[in-house]
Image: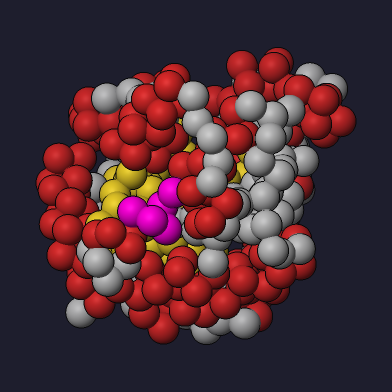
């Protein structure tokens, strides 16, 4: 099984944003040493507790501090941007770090309505144009516009020897079919979805149209996982992430709370029920339990690769979780 890392660069209650971003670099380095296939960092805008608003900036820094692990965006929120500029940025990264760059493409706003308006005057219209934006981006990445196209005379330079690898990221049938139509790899965000992911992935596989840049389908499944030496310890660590999610829904939760803060946070009955539901969408346990669940998910979702997102208060606990899972699954 191939394993990868999705990093949302969370800020804990005892950290600054600078601390969180530096921990992201350490995580990418650790992932490389442990045998993870790729490291992606997410894009968020003015969301409390998340430090990365510009993956492309972090990727240049992380690329310079790693040697071989694939690195990419999870995701570039394409409706905010012109495809030409996205192609220029990721072609630049692919020139600096040959055969290591992924472009995860998404269409979520990544922040509040106010942040969305500050980034783009016509976000909703651009969402509707997402298929066209993806097609345009692919032409820029492969420098293959038809001769009669207005952009055929320009290049998203520098053109790397190996183009960045594009992925469609999503949680819906629409995103799956968009990936399939364009011959692109598909990453399904199970950790943030209540949809029937297995059925959506099946639709992607059935509808896949081979292209020169994508001759066969690839499926990546992203799940939330927290692993520790014992089940009890893993559940204790996971409480920080669960309580933080509840706090964010209430407009609180500026930072990931400590385990002690999470234990002392008072929940009403509805919130207790929600906590149980959220936990069911996570993988929490000791290495054997987590490994077994990952293999089950791989088979159920027909995934070529599983990407793990792990949010803990302590960077040490997060690093340990990735280490234990790697030793259980990759060794």
The magenta region covers: 235-239
Q: Quadrant of residue 186?
A: top left
The residue lying at 62 percent from left, 71 percent from top is 23
The residue lying at 23 percent from left, 47 percent from top is 303
The residue lying at 29 percent from left, 49 percent from top is 283
- Identify whether 177 is placed above or below 231: above
- Identify whether 68 is placed above or below 170: below
Q: Residue 280, position in %: x, y?
A: 29, 36
Q: Residue 17, position in %: x, y?
A: 75, 61
- Left or right: 96 as drawn, with respect to 302: right
Q: Nearer the viewer, residue 4 or 290?
A: 290
- Identify whether 121 is placed above or below 30: above
Query: Is residue 181 in sight in this rendering?
Result: no
Considering the image in quadrants, where does the C terminus appear? bottom left
Q: Quadrant of residue 252?
A: top right
- Identify whether 221 is placed above or below 290: above
Q: Residue 243, position in %: x, y?
A: 51, 41
Q: Is residue 329 magenta?
A: no
Q: Quadrant of residue 196?
A: top left
- Left or right: 233 as drawn, with respect to 13: left
- Left or right: 243 as drawn, with respect to 18: left
Q: Main secondary structure of the magenta part?
A: helix
Query: Is residue 199 in sight in this rendering?
Result: yes
Q: Nearer the viewer, residue 258 or 67?
A: 258
Q: Nearer the viewer, residue 301 or 258?
A: 258
The residue lying at 54 percent from left, 35 percent from top is 266
Considering the image in quadrants, where does the N terminus appear? bottom left
């Amino acid at each position: 099984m191939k394993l990868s890392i999705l990093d949302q660069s969370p800020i804990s209650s005892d950290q600054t944003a600078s601390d969180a971003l530096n921990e992201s670099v350490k995580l990418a380095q650790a992932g490389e040493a442990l045998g993870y296939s790729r490291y992606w960092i997410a894009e968020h805008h003015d969301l409390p507790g998340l430090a990365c608003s510009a993956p492309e900036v972090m990727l240049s820094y992380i690329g310079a501090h790693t040697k071989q692990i694939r690195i990419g965006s999870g995701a570039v929120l394409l409706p905010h941007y012109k495809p030409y500029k996205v192609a220029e940025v990721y072609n630049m990264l692919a020139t600096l770090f040959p055969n290591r760059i992924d472009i995860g493409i998404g269409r979520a706003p990544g922040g509040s309505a106010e942040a969305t308006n500050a980034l783009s005057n016509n976000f909703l219209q651009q969402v509707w144009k997402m298929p066209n934006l993806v097609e345009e981006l692919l032409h820029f990445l492969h420098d293959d516009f038809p001769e009669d196209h207005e952009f055929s005379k320009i290049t998203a330079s520098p053109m790397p020897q190996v183009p960045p690898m594009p992925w469609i990221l999503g949680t819906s049938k629409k995103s799956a079919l968009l990936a399939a139509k364009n011959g692109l790899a598909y990453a399904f965000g199970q950790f943030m979805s209540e949809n029937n992911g297995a059925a959506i992935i099946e639709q992607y596989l059935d509808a896949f149209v081979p292209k020169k840049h994508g001759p066969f389908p690839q499926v990546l499944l992203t799940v939330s996982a927290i692993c520790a030496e014992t089940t009890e310890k893993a559940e204790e660590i996971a409480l920080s992430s669960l309580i933080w999610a509840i706090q964010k829904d209430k407009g609180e939760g500026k930072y990931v709370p400590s385990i002690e803060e999470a234990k002392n946070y008072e929940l009403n009955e509805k919130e207790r029920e929600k906590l149980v539901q959220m936990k069911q969408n996570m993988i929490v346990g000791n290495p054997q339990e987590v490994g077994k669940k990952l293999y089950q998910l791989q088979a159920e979702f027909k995934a070529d690769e599983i990407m793990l997102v792990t949010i803990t208060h302590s960077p040490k606990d997060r690093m340990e979780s990735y280490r234990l899972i790697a030793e259980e699954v990759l060794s």
